[in-house]
Amino acid sequence: MNVFSVQKDSIRKKPKKEKDPDRKRTGWTFGILPSVAYDADLGFQYGALSNIYYFGDGSTYPEYLHSIYVEAAYTTRNYGLFRLSYDSKYLIPHHRLTVDMVYMPDAMCDFYGYNGYTSVYNNVWRDSKHYTAEEGYRSRAFYKMKRDLFRFAADIQGPIGKNWYWNGGIGFLGYLINSVDVAMLNKGKKEEKKLPDIPGLYDKYVLWGLIRPNEQHGGMHPYLRGGITYDSRDRQTNPTRGIYADAFLTYTAAFNTQKFGDQREFNNLRFNFTFRHYVPIYQDYISFAYRLATQLTVAGQSPFYMNSYWNTLYIQRVLYEGLGGSNTLRGPLRNRILSNGFAFANIEFRFKVCKFHVKKENFYIGLNPFLDAGMVLQPYKINENSLREAIAANDPDFNEDLSDYFNFDRKAIYRPHLSAGLGLKVAMNDNFVLSVDWAVPFSKQDNNSMANLYVKIGYMF
């Protein structure tokens, strides 16, 4: 027998490595990307981010075993983002653990007053590109304030029974609030580009007593939360079928410190409810998704700067603010609707236009037209006569028409804020999703621009 023929036959009979028809990812996968984004409210973002996933043997794909997210970035409108986040359903068996820590300095945080349409928005006062001082322009910083936010959150979820889970969490929110630092923003700029040093809306609210002394500079707020969740989704990121619903209470305390004054009145209890439904239309290529959500103050009071913070059980995006902006109501200006309690809805059709592969990675491109709506449920109580008395006592030089600031028609408070738009999604391995949303508000009181553009990571819900 020819030895070489035997060796040849043995080589032929060597089993080939089977290919995975589903192209499941295993082990670790990660990448370091430039944190380049755009938000109509925050400007262009530059920095770096990394999302690290561990899929183990691939048996749970597209669900990951562990996710670590790191990002450091800054925007052209002086908004900073420094974040470290961890998420896992397997570190503690049968429990989901999420830990998130973030620091966000914001030199020009939006502040448009209370109760949405109750507070009149004058685009000419802030639009330096289209109006001069003679035409009514005041300052780009008129509807702004300075806000630094530090947040730590740790949340855990455990099973109760078929698709039902209990939730618990602790966290801390630290706010530093002040007037816009115009001198810092003007440093190094040409004279014609400098911001005028005039009082903004935040300063006027302080002077008129609508923002009280013990809340005007921020505060430190530890919190404790608990609730229940129902989750029958087929996957966590861009599910095509199932329901996700949660209901929980958050008790937030306030430190009584020398810096911020006596804040004991700001101990409060809030109730949150969210309902998401994902309906398949054609395989996993076309689906219909909608979200209904509300946040209500059940007991106590909340300082004005926390009323834009939307409580969520799991922090997937860096910050959930409402109403208005990329996380709750796309199209209206960020934090346009500020109140003690609110509700909103998002409706989307989701299309996966094409799927493709690059080396070992799975990609798809998607489109999703959407409609967003939101409204005030628990408004601030603003009495016109009391306000005029406070202005006369504390701001004797005020000689403007108060109707330029407030619409005292009670019907305006509960008028819905509406917007619509189109989203583009580029997804890798069904988890890392680059999201571009283009949205148009129905009312110029929400945003005088024709449209707002948001470039983010992940689906909105």
Image (cartoon, grey):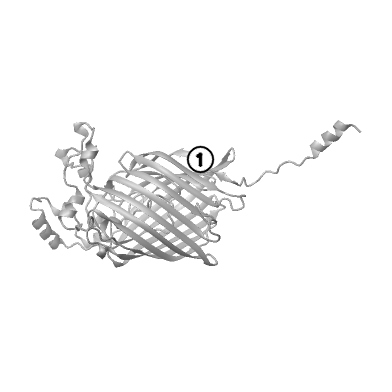
Looking at this view, name the residue that lies furthest to the front: 258
In this picture, residue 366 sits left or right of residue 377? right
- Identify residue type, mark 1: Gly
* Label 1 Cα crowd, 10 Å radius (few <14 / some 14-19 / many 20+): few
According to the picture, the residue beneath numbered tag 1 turns out to be 31
In the picture, the quarter occupied by the N terminus is: top right
Is residue 461 something that shows in the picture? no
- The quadrant holding residue 46 is top left
Indicate the position of residue 317 as horizontal and vertical percent values.
41, 50
Q: Which residue lies furthest to the right in this view?
A: 1
On the picture, is 7 further left or further right than 197? Answer: right
Left of 102 or right of it: where is 195? left
Residue 238 lies, in percent from the top left, at: 50, 52
Quarter of the picture holding the C terminus: bottom left
Q: Where is residue 230 in the image (x, y as percent from the top left)?
A: 49, 64
Question: Closer to the camera, 131 or 30?
Answer: 30
Q: Which residue is drawn at 73% across and 41% down?
A: 16
**Total number of numbered discs in the rendering:** 1
Which one is nearer the viewer's eye here, 303 or 113? 303
Q: Quadrant of residue 337?
A: bottom left
Residue 34 in percent (x, y) is at 43, 37
Residue at image point 21% right, 41% down: 182
What secondary structure is marked by label 1? Answer: loop
Relative depth, front residue between 337 and 14: 14
> Is residue 141 something that shows in the picture?
yes
